[in-house]
Amino acid sequence: MSDKDNKKINKDCELVLSKGNVILYIIFAVLFILLPLPVSALLKDKLVSENNENRVLTEMPVLTMETIDIYPQQFDRYFSDHLPFRDQLITVGGLFDNYVMKQTLSGDVAIGKDNWLFYTGTQLPGENPPADYLGSNLFTPEELELCKNNLVRASEYLAERDCEFAVVISPSKMSLYPEYLPERYGEPAEYKRMQQIVDYLRTNTDLNIVWEYEPLSEYKASHPDEQLFLKYDTHENSLGSYVSASAIAEALGYEPLKEPDTLEWQEVYDYPWDLSRQMNLGMILTDDVNWWFPNFRDHSVSRWTNDDMTELRYTNDCGDGDPKKLMLVSDSFGAGMMPYLSDYFNESYMIFYFKYTPELLDKEDPDILVYQVTERLIGNMKTFSMETPFIEPD
């Protein structure tokens, strides 16, 4: 056989092998796409499948004549949210992001130094934590005046009901722990929107303003080994909430809470934390410790909450507290402070700001109302009112 014939045979073999490889790759690709469907159906009772991403998954859309144009996009979102082995794949991706890449593809979570997680998202109208940190979203003079007028009007409205009013502004984790942020965020701004609104309200009103950043930063400086925010969560830990609640109580005219150093500290591992859940690593990132002070109370207090924990009610069992009734209109930061504030009163009640209504104010008829807002939601002051339900800011 000639060299020419050998070359032709080799070329034909390579072509066959090349075609065979293509076919093999196609088979593998099809199996990879389709096999999870029957496998997940067979193993559905054995596979753990939970929504650990701290968001609501898309529900199955209904095909009607009215929705026929948008049904393909709706179904695509539904299928993406309910893809077989989705949780497992997201967890693998989260592990890769957290331990290898040290950053996430999601715009909602940043992985900082020592594995601290920070919320950087814009899930709610008006929020932008990086802009808060960099001071690039300062209020305009008109917005400052609008916020001031809304709060003054709320104070006057409550005064007509013989109700005291206080405003509490809570810092984000970025503001209190900038040293753990990724390097790419740079140094924090010297002047941020949070301080801007505090300065403006303190200068131009006689409102009772509690800026939590002040007691928290003081405590951090004097207790550098004690953590005030949760490592894998957006919120203060119980110690941070305790320090903040003590400052609020003092601003309302009460004795501050007992010094934390004088109390028994109890470790609490109450994960999964909200930011680790967004990476589907809620049951993996569990090494952070929360703290609780079981002996802080001077009174016996019972707690009630609704199903979604957007309402909290505390009642002094013996009735030996202050007969004034406290009402807290707040975001989720307020829920951490309520156990401590409730020890002062015979009755205290908290409602999340987006569930507030004037009818609820009539029903509860508080003697003291505290409005609490976290740094990333300060824009809510532009639409804040005691006379209407919550209105989302632009």
Image (cartoon, helix red, strand yellow):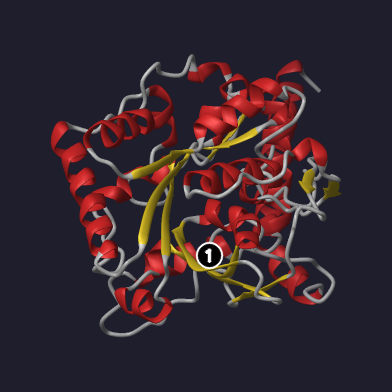
Q: Does residue 99 lie above or below 43 as drawn? A: above
Q: In the rendering, at what x and y percent does residue 342 appear?
A: 61, 62
The image shows residue 48, relative to residue 271, as above or below, that is below
**Residue at image x 66%, y 58%?**
52
On the rendered structure, is 176 left or right of 392?
A: right
**What residue is drawn where x is 70% and y is 42%?**
239
Amino acid at dot 1: Val
Decide: is 89 above or below 74.
above
Q: Residue furthest bottom?
A: 64
Q: Please identify the quarter of the rendering in which residue 379 is found.
A: top left
Q: Residue at x 49, y 15 (%)?
A: 186
Image side of residue 133 versus residue 224, left or right: left
Image x and y of residue 285, in percent: 77, 43
Q: Is 234 left or right of 142, judged from the image as shown? A: right
Foreground: 35 or 75?
A: 75
Specify whether 190 is left or right of 237.
Answer: left
Residue 161 at x, y percent in the picture: 29, 70
Q: Is residue 320 visible?
A: yes
Task: State which quarter of the image contains the N terminus.
Answer: top right
Q: Position of residue 276 (x, y in %)?
A: 67, 46
Can you identify the residue that label 1 sits on? 56
Instruction: Categorize mark 1 by other alpha carbons within 10 Å: few (<14), some (14-19), many (20+).
Output: few
Report how many numbered discs are placed on residues in the image. 1
Indicate the secondary structure of the residue bearing disc 1: loop
Depth check: 140 or 182 in front? 140
Rendered residue at 48%/14% (across/down): 187
Is 286 or 163 nearer to us in this picture? Answer: 163
Q: Is residue 293 above or below residue 259?
A: below
Residue 20 seen in the figure? no
